[in-house]
Image (cartoon, coloured by chain):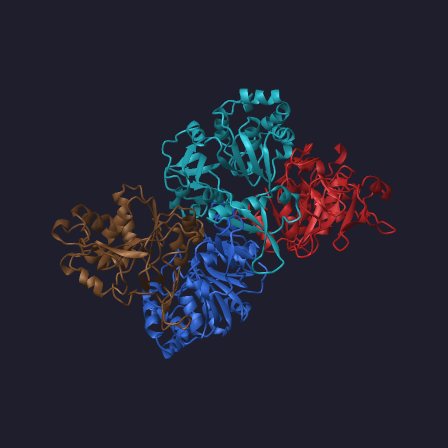
Chain colours: A blue, B brown, C cyan, D red
């Protein structure tokens, strides 16, 4: 881990610069929500959010807090809780620049960065209005078959990848199991900041079964312990989402005032849920 | 309630009919993938798996018991491109008569009046999965439009565009349509019991073909109903516990 | 698993057709040597061997037995035992068509197939004589930066991927741990045939830690149990190579007669090593 | 024997000198990767790690204790392309005065008279790793040629070719050369103790630059020798047990 001075969530939030290109996973794949609250607390601005490949409450909160200038995503939704009200409002008012994408395009553009490639080809997309509005996507000829157009996507190299995982060790190795997109994010990004439920005292490489699902410390700039760090969202195989909180959030965030109330009352610890 | 209600005394719910109908559209498939927030397609795929004696492989995103992907979020898309997924499901805020799908919003992009979540994997999977089933419960002129405001994924492609996949059928609360890839149009296959062709015409914003006599959508037989209400309810309940509370027949408190 | 009729090594060898494009891992990454002997026994011919990304004894034996027409590889070597004598002899006599490659090019071409892409770009290579001799590799322009040439590699889609692993379950899920190139091979190939040390009675998906290192049965056509299936080579975390056998092999295989003797005397069971 | 011989009484072996010299070439690196069949570079990287107090990260292919890659065979190459590998090692059946490397064979390709294993990752890593150290023990006109018969990986590239990496130094049993990326030539930096410039000239097939006074390659001091013969011997012995039997000082039975 290169950033030894990062010890807590506020250090971590301070290390994510205003204007950073910030990659975050889908809400179901390890969102670092405690760190996201710290980012909002420090008043982060001008973020270019890259959702891998979609987001929900995390993008919603950052947008509502005015931290996001640009969002690159294949969708923003609160799933069964409904539309993301601050996202929808920001779109309607033109407050954020949209880079609408499709899931495999975001994966492919990150893989390009992870491979140090300037671009990655991808099938599909041609004829979609996504392409019309994505000036940064190009259609090229398949060099091996005449008359076979294919989309070329420029690499996405995030400044920072930020996510939450169940377990790391003290050297900075992080267990992500089958959530392999987190590994691609870490390979692609310049820096990766990770919050975890627990820091193991022994190396994750001691158990070869565990090792197959580990991102090596080589790619990790800092790990911060954050119990329930995905709250109010869930963490795979650990805990579910806080349904009561989310229902309440959706009701409140319909208005600017309601959302301001959420921000004001949202404590550092998940106490609001316990009300 | 799960197994206590004799299936032969109770008519299928609307959603049970949809599950049964989708399952029929999956006949002959080797592997069906079900995306996020898709309880009815998920139940349908699991039903067809049961009917196939396990020959059909089903991957349900979000499931622990029925998701065997181990290569992260990209695997669904890679798997489709390898030709290893035979059927997939797409919804749509708008769907038009050529099979174009809009998952982005209405009005002028980017400041759309109504903004939906976004295109997800549609702009890719619609090209690569041979049998894409369009599924949207709401059947109104608001959803089934003449021309979508934004093409998340086009129903057809020009010659020379690599496209082994595309629309196969469209299922709503009212009716089932086949998609004709030559004519780039929907053709009404059947209307669900309790509804009529006029109702379908009144509530569809695009022109479509239809036979002179439009059949009724077949109902599940007693054996199927028992399967749906028993094993399938259990299996899909792993991923969608709230859904199974409302979608299946619940006896007198229905 | 689609090929339920495959019960033993000879069934498996019969299912690999003459002329097949056959992908095999490096000698240190799970070579299916028992299956390779079965292939030689059945007199396989005209194979197009794709070594991922190099090979050793496995390519050497298949070449010596006359089973290989084309070899695509980044190297063939017996490592500390020296050069691969039958490979070197076949090259000198022009008996095999060489498709000399570089390791990341083979990985990239397989990844292209795994993604259903016609090609994959790759940095490097330009100015190497590999490119001069690989008529199937092209130099294209980076579509996003003028004057930036980059190599485009056509996808390699093997007919069959063949490898040995420590563990599978009865559904055909195969544990490969950190040997992720085996997963890419299985994703890229039309069919994958796997031999394993052991078949587990319980599903490999029951342990989430194990699951991160598993190739799902979806990609596996057949699994055959073969104890010591990598012999005389080693299997990661299980057993080492048979040094005595390999030293003896290298001495014998220097001549056509010596190699013929190896083939004749090589039993189905690893008895030669015990002499 | 491992720790029993007092380091101050015994001169370094040839290989101990090579290990020490390579370690010096790695000063300032953050991450060094060591490929297959590379015991001396591996020992050198581990030595430099020890000298850096652990600040240098070392990935030794084939090691269990010092290999933390988890994404299969492609990870080394991806990692290099991400700019996360600062130094790597290449050998060569032939190496010429422009730094071109031949790992394929001599004579006319493809039916080469002498066939070597093949190019491995050279045609890629030589372009992408900033500090590639060419290492070949044999220093003869057979190896160090005017022009290689086959370019596995070129020492230099035309303008416009993406190439953040390239040759940094060449080390043999006789001498250490720096590579001048402007002039595309080697420059003799030092000659190992017991050898002279004339011997280097006689045994080198290509022209190279040199200072008027060629220094002697520095020897490891006592502390370094003790480190090499103790901890480094143990660490590299994990991967190369046979190597440590011969490469390090063994006392009277040397």
Q: Is residue D9 visible?
A: yes
Residue drawn at (45%, 41%) of the image: C175
Q: Position of residue A265 (x, y in %)?
A: 39, 75
Name the residue located 54 percent from the left edge and 31 percent from the top edge: C68
Residue B39 versus residue A263 in the image, above or below: above
For the residue pair D130 and B211, the one nearer the viewer reads as B211
Position of the N terminus of chain C by quadrant = top left
Looking at the picture, how far across and down is residue B166, in whole percent? 36, 53
Q: Residue furthest bottom?
A: A257
Q: Is residue B103 left or right of residue D243?
A: left
Q: Position of residue C117 (x, y in %)?
A: 48, 49
Q: Is residue D10 above or below residue D158?
A: above
Residue under the image location 66 percent in, 33 percent down:
D111
Q: How many marks?
A: 0
Give the left or right position of residue C227, taking residue B21 as reference.
Answer: right
Residue D119 placement: quadrant: top right
Work out which quarter of the rendered image holds the C terminus of chain C and state it: top right
User: Looking at the image, which is closer to me, A16 or D108?
Assistant: D108
In the depicted structure, whether residue B23 falls above or below residue D93: below
- Viewer can see residue A198: no
Tell me where residue C145 appears, x and y as whole percent.
59, 60
Q: Nearer the viewer, residue C155 or D17?
A: C155
Q: From what the image shows, is residue B34 above or below residue C200?
A: below
Instruction: Name the side, left or right, on which C105 lies relative to B44.
Output: right
The one nearer the camera, A4 or B55, is B55
In the displayed image of the protein, which residue is found farthest to the left? B9
């Amino acid at each position: 881990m290169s950033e030894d001075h990062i010890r807590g969530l506020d250090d971590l939030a301070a290390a994510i610069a205003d204007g950073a290109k910030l990659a975050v996973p889908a809400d179901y794949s390890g969102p670092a929500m405690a760190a996201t609250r710290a980012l909002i607390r420090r008043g982060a601005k001008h973020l270019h959010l890259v959702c891998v490949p979609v987001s929900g409450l995390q993008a919603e909160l950052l947008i509502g807090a005015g931290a996001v200038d640009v969002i690159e995503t294949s969708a923003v939704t609160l799933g069964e809780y409904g539309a993301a009200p601050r996202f929808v409002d920001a779109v309607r008012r033109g407050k954020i620049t949209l880079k609408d994408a499709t899931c495999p395009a975001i994966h492919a553009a990150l893989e390009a960065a992870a491979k140090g490639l300037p671009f990655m080809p991808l099938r599909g997309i041609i004829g979609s209005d996504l392409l019309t509005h994505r000036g940064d996507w190009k259609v090229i000829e398949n060099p091996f078959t005449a008359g076979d157009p294919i989309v070329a996507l420029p690499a996405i190299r995030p400044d920072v990848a930020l996510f939450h995982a169940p377990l790391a060790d003290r050297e900075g190795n992080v267990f992500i199991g089958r959530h392999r997109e987190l590994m691609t994010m870490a390979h692609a990004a310049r820096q990766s900041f990770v919050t975890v439920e627990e820091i193991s005292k022994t190396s994750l490489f001691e158990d070869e079964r565990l090792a197959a699902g580990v991102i090596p410390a080589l790619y990790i700039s800092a790990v911060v312990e954050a119990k329930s760090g995905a709250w109010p969202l869930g963490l795979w195989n650990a805990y579910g989402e806080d349904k009561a909180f989310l229902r309440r959030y959706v009701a409140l965030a319909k208005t600017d005032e309601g959302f301001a109330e959420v921000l004001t009352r949202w404590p550092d610890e998940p106490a609001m849920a316990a009300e | 309630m799960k197994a206590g209600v004799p299936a032969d005394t109770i008519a299928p719910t609307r959603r049970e009919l949809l599950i049964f109908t989708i399952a029929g559209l999956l006949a002959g498939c080797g592997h069906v993938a079900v995306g996020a927030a898709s309880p009815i397609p998920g139940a349908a795929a699991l039903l067809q798996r049961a009917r196939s004696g396990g020959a059909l492989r089903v991957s349900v995103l979000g499931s622990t018991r029925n998701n065997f992907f181990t290569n992260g979020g990209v695997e669904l898309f890679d798997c489709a491109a390898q030709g290893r997924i035979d059927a997939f499901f797409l919804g749509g805020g708008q769907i038009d008569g050529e099979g174009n799908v809009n998952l982005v919003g209405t009005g002028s992009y980017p400041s759309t009046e109504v903004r939906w979540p976004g295109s997800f994997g549609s702009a890719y999977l619609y090209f690569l999965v041979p049998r894409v089933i369009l599924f949207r419960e709401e059947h109104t002129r608001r959803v089934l439009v003449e021309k979508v405001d934004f093409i998340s994924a086009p129903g057809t492609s020009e010659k020379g565009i690599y496209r082994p996949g595309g629309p196969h059928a469209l299922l709503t609360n009212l009716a089932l349509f086949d998609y004709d890839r030559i004519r780039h149009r929907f053709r009404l296959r059947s209307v669900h019991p309790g509804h009529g062709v006029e109702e379908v015409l009144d509530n569809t914003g695009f022109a479509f073909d239809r036979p002179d006599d439009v059949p009724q959508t077949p109902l599940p037989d007693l054996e199927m109903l028992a399967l749906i209400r028993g094993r399938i309810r259990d299996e899909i309940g792993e991923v969608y516990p709230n859904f199974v509370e409302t979608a299946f027949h619940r006896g007198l408190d229905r």
